[in-house]
Amino acid sequence: MKRLRWLVPILVVLAVFLAACGSPEPEVITETIVETVEVEKIVEATVVVTEIEEVTVETEVEVIVTPTPDPSGITKGGVLKAAIGADPEGFDPHLTSAYSSFEVLENVFDTLVTVDENLNMAPSLAESWDVSDDNLTWTFYLREGVVFHNGRSLTADDVVYSYDRIMNPDTGSGVAWRFGSVESVTAVDDMTVAIQLTEPSPNLLGRIGGYKGMAIVAQENVEDGSIATNPIGTGPFKFIEYVPGDHVTLEANTDYWEEGKPYLDGVTYQIIPDETVLLTNLLTGEVDWADGLPPQRVTELATSGEIIVDKEAGGDYWYIGLNLDREPFNDPLVRQAIAYAIDRDQVAAAAKWDTATANDGPIPQDSFWYYDYQPYTQDLDKARELLAEAGYPNGFDTEFMPTTFYEETVRTAQVLQAQLSAIGINAEIRTLEWGTWLEEEGAGNFDMYICGWVGNLDPDDYFYAQHYTDQVFNFTGYSNPDVDDLLAAGRVETDEAARKGIYDQVQQMIIDDAPYVYLYNPATVNAWLPDVRGYFARGDSAIRFENTWLDR
């Protein structure tokens, strides 16, 4: 060790610490600096001295810079490690319907309007709008200064292109039903869009902003074919890469239109299908955030102090979808027999422990749109009578199709298998990984599938896409002209009380027809480390990180 006053060519690595309030995690950067230096510091180095003089040297300096909190107390920087349970199934928001995709896409794309933290519609790419006196023309005024991730400015033409693409039957978009009353979308000028309706649409804002499947996309991203693998949006984070079975990487959009956001440098989604492994990684700090927990441990972990657990009542429903194009499920008596044979409380407990509420219908009890019609209290004698009346006194053989992506569907299938055996229905369980499951559902290759419909706000969200005749998500093949008429009427009724009455009728008819045997409404459960701030679980199940920051 020597005290050095002068250096002749010496390679020095200096650690420079820039102090800040608190003790956030330092960020390490490397810079090459050419300057005249004079060092009064004890360092450990190998020194070759040829002459004593002050010289100009080039040093490789490793600078450890501690992020400095802004005046609000929010520390900017850092990468959030988020654990999700399955691989995304495509990144084109107009074509994919997989929740695992939208866990990512929520942070890449924007919609014209959006759902705020209180589940109310709020400005997004459109900062304001007005409606004509006849409720048939909605005019949206776009926010200035919005750019896509490729640097191109957003204009009204992008909104027109995106909506026309969704409405074009050749696209095959699963969200085209949301534009059922739209006659045209036009650019009034570069920053103004007009939507012309054929009839009043009281829920238009919810239809265009309640779901990221209605995202505004860049035409060039679609036309060069890259949107499915490298999506370009206007959201708070840019898509960087996807390694199947391993991770998805997002990087902060430094040109994001909401000034100062996002706070994070990026998000890395780590794909961890096993919920026990996911929890272990969270508890050991390998990940910062998780999209779910083993349901049997939610209550325990919420009071442990080790992690933050947020459980929010949501609008999701879980159900059995019956294939009405196959016997014996084309007979409503058989479907009702299945509905009577089930103990929903037992199913909900097995699937989600104490984080779900059994329900004969799809809409949860705390919703304004809930209809208290619960006809299917378990009654095995009634179920057997209905089977005999349908011509199946000894039951029949069939199959459940759950998916490994949602472990609760596997647990549900096991409980249902035991319950239906009591009335002579012998159900095998065919468990599929998520991608294959979606293909089989879409092709109609099932007897009974188990899944959920998530992110619902308006009653139109609960019913139209899955229950209206020939809609793209109506995989059961259900068709009831009276239900169709009511669903069409509910879409245009502007009086809330009258609209409530319409959807009460819809719920009773569908529950009686039983093309879907509804099971329960789960809570949305997310969990994260205590130093993850600014995040909360949402009732619409959306995963958004633009307000999230790391207190470290």
Image: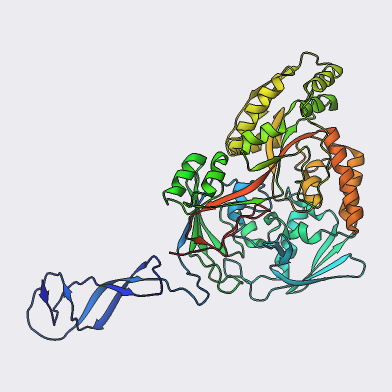
Vertical arrangement, residue 425 with respect to residue 363, above or below: above
Choose between 109 and 374: the one closer to the eye: 374
Q: Quadrant of the C terminus?
A: bottom left
**Residue at the extreme top of the image, as rendered:** 394
Residue 9 visible: yes
Image quadrant where residue 51 sits: bottom left
Question: Along the horizontal axis of the image, is 484 left or right of 519?
Answer: right
Residue at 64%, 32% in the rendered image: 412
Q: Quadrant of the N terminus?
A: bottom left
Give the farthest residue toward the front.
Answer: 303
Q: Residue at x 83, y 62 (%)?
A: 184
Residue shown at the point (57%, 41%) measured from the top left:
295
Q: Position of residue 58 (x, y in %)?
A: 23, 77
Q: Vertical placement of 93 versus 354: above or below?
A: below
In this picture the colour scheme is rainbow
Find residue 47 and report its horizontal and vertical position in percent.
10, 73
